[in-house]
Image (cartoon, rainbow, N blue to C red):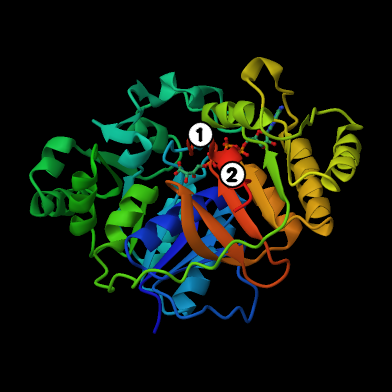
């Protein structure tokens, strides 16, 4: 049977988050990393998520890669497409949310799509088009200091309008509160007016259920894992019988933290007290020093951490790609040295690590924390991966994830 839902995610941790959301809504979910290779066979599933590393690349590249995945998913029989981006709307004035959403909608022949990044379980809510992180506007949250996509404007209509030539409008909470028919009518009116992107308010899961119910006729919808879960719950697929989560492979663990987000900084601080840790700085000999440290430690330790995570004043501007490459090289060496569990903090960092390891797909297992599922890789190397979005997870996540069962 063909999957009912296909999803393009703009980074690897976002892919795991949305895959966990589909899985929680009862869908058998397959997660693929990177553009599917020719001849990739998708196991019997209800949802297929393809995670790309397109959040911070030039927008033309993001469009081309996302469109190719859309065509591939269509070839797999998928009829509805979900574009997953970050619940904190990580993007710049050049994109990539607007250009990719435009391209996917146009290719699907859709005149209108919805933009709904609310993910209440992660504290992301949207009111009057303004994105909140917990009790703060996005622009007052630590996201304003993100190394790649600093978010300094909380008004999503305004943010998106800078990324697309098409019209952007709001469906306010007052309409969402009136239910599915009211939202359907509002969307039809916006479509008739020539609006391409309808930003929709939502502050709790009930609102997301309304948005999901009102958008079943749209071939492309966009958002974070909150709407994905609501949309997945409407597919009519029977809930999984449960079980079926393979055990984590035994063997040593390595934590690689490249995220500089607030939650990661707290998790790294706690993990430093529980395992040997090495700070990777951004200077020429740092990658070699990190590898040497790993080789020294790995023989005798069950878990180690290498991190570059740092608060804004301690970061090295312009070093993002250098740091990603260094952490990816450490991951490859750790796998060669016998690591069986690799825990990565950060979306871009996860992309670099997973690509370097040559992992192309995974079965989605239990969540260590909300939106952070264990992944058991398919093919070689056989690893348990935990790819943690920068802002996700309880403070002790890295410690728990590396405990010997
Ligand atoms: N000390 C540092 N100085 C500068 N950039 C860094 C440093 N540590 C990590 N980075 C970069 O910051 C980016 C963090 O992004 P990402 O991994 O997506 O984390 P998050 O999930 O928190 O957004 C990565 O590109 C990473 O290489
Ligand atoms: O939607 C979310 O918040 C996450 O799934 C996500 O995309 C986080 O990205 P990173 O913080 O870059 O890991």
Does ligand 1 reach within 8 Å of label 1's beta carbon? no
Mark earlier in primary sequence (2, 1) = 1
* Residue beneath the point at 48% across and 72% down: 73
Q: Quadrant of ligand 1?
A: top right
Q: Is residue 11 visible?
A: no
Query: In the image, is the residue at mark 2 within 8 Å of ligand 2 by its beta carbon?
Result: yes
In this figure, which residue is indicated by the disc labeled 1? 93
Q: Classify residue 265 by image quadrant.
A: top right
Q: Please give the name of the residue rendered at 80% of the width and 51% of the height, measured from the top-left corner.
A: 334
- From the image, tell me which residue sits under label 2: 347
Quadrant housing residue 153: top left
Q: Position of residue 68 (x, y in %)?
A: 55, 66
**320 vs 59: above or below:** above
Disc 2 is placed on an element classified as: helix
Residue at image position (79%, 31%) is 280
Percent x, y for residue 168? 31, 41
How many numbered discs sit on the rendered protein? 2
Q: Residues within 10 Å of mark 1 (few under 14, many from 20)?
A: some
Quadrant location of residue 256? top right
Residue 363 picture location, percent across and down: 54, 67
* Separation of residues labelled 2 and 1 (CA atoms): 20 Å
Q: Is residue 105 left or right of residue 33?
A: left
Q: Is residue 302 above or below residue 321?
A: below
């Amino acid at each position: 049977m063909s999957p009912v839902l296909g999803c393009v995610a703009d980074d690897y941790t976002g892919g795991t988050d949305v895959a966990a959301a589909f899985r929680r809504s009862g869908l058998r979910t397959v997660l693929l990393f990177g553009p599917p290779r020719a001849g990739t066979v998708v196991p019997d599933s209800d949802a297929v998520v393809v995670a790309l590393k397109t959040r911070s690349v030039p927008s033309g590249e993001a469009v081309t890669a996302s469109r190719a995945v859309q065509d591939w998913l269509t070839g797999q029989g998928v009829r509805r497409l979900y574009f997953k981006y970050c619940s904190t709307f990580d993007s710049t004035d050049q994109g990539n949310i607007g250009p990719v959403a435009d391209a996917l909608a146009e290719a699907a022949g859709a005149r209108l799509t919805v933009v709904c990044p609310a993910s209440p379980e992660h504290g992301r809510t949207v009111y009057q088009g303004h994105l909140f992180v917990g009790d703060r506007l996005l622009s007052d949250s630590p996201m304003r200091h993100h190394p790649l996509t600093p978010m300094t404007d909380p008004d999503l209509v305004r943010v998106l309008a800078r990324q697309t030539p098409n019209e952007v409008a709001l469906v306010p909470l007052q309409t969402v509160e009136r239910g599915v028919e009211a939202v359907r009518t509002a969307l039809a009116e916006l479509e008739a007016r020539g609006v391409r992107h309808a930003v929709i308010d939502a502050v709790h899961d009930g609102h997301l259920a309304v948005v999901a119910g009102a958008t079943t006729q749209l071939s492309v919808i966009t958002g974070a894992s909150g709407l994905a879960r609501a949309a997945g719950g409407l597919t009519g697929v029977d809930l999984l019988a449960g079980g079926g989560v393979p055990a984590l492979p035994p063997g040593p663990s390595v934590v690689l933290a490249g995220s500089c987000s607030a939650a990661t900084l707290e998790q790294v601080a706690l993990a430093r007290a529980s395992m040997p840790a090495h700070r990777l700085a951004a200077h020429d000999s740092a990658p070699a020093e990190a590898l040497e440290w790993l080789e020294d430690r790995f023989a005798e330790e069950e878990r180690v951490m290498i991190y570059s995570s740092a608060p804004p004043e301690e970061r090295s501007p312009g070093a993002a790609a250098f740091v990603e490459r260094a952490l990816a090289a450490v991951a490859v060496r750790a796998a060669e040295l016998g690591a069986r569990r690799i825990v990565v903090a950060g979306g871009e960092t996860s992309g670099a690590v997973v690509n370097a390891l040559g992992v192309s797909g995974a079965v989605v297992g239990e969540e260590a924390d909300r939106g952070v599922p264990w992944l058991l890789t398919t093919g070689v190397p056989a690893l348990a991966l935990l790819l943690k979005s920068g802002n996700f997870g309880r403070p002790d996540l890295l410690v728990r994830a590396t405990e010997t069962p």
